[in-house]
Amino acid sequence: MAGSPGMLRGVFGQAPGHEFLVLSMWNSAAEHGKYREERVQRLGTRAEVDTDIAALAGDVVAIEPSWTA
């Protein structure tokens, strides 16, 4: 994710066992959409994630503007 246009922050965490959480913050939904379409599939193929990942889920959460003021 580093160096991806529009990405503000990212963090990666691992729970005990084989569970991971990746959070990222983007300038806009459009920037995040471009990252998903242009990079995620290519990176997944390169990393051979199909052999390592049992399940993958994601969601977009809007930030309450008053929290960042």
Image (cartoon, rainbow, N blue to C red):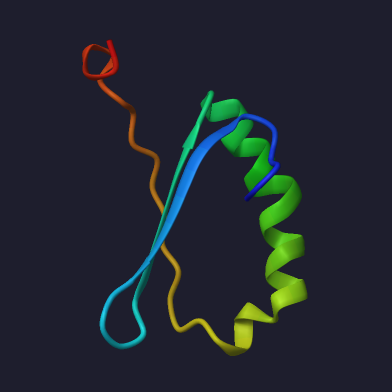
Is 62 on the left-hand or right-hand side of 42? Answer: left
Q: Position of residue 65 (x, y in %)?
A: 29, 14
Task: Give the answer, above or below, for where 66 lies relative to 57.
Answer: above
Is 17 on the left-hand or right-hand side of 27? Answer: left
The answer to which quarter of the image holds residue 69 is top left
Q: Residue at x 69, y 40 (%)?
A: 4
How many numbered tags mark residues here? Answer: 0
Q: Residue at x 26, y 83 (%)?
A: 16
Task: Give the answer, above or below, for where 26 lies relative to 59.
Answer: above
Q: Residue at x 43, y 76 (%)?
A: 55
Q: Position of residue 53 (x, y in %)?
A: 51, 81
Q: Position of residue 24 (x, y in %)?
A: 46, 44
Q: Residue at x 38, y 47 (%)?
A: 59
Task: Give the answer, above or below, for where 27 lies relative to 12.
Answer: above
Q: Position of residue 1 (x, y in %)?
A: 63, 50
| 10 vs 48, nearest the viewer | 10
Is 16 on the left-hand or right-hand side of 57? Answer: left
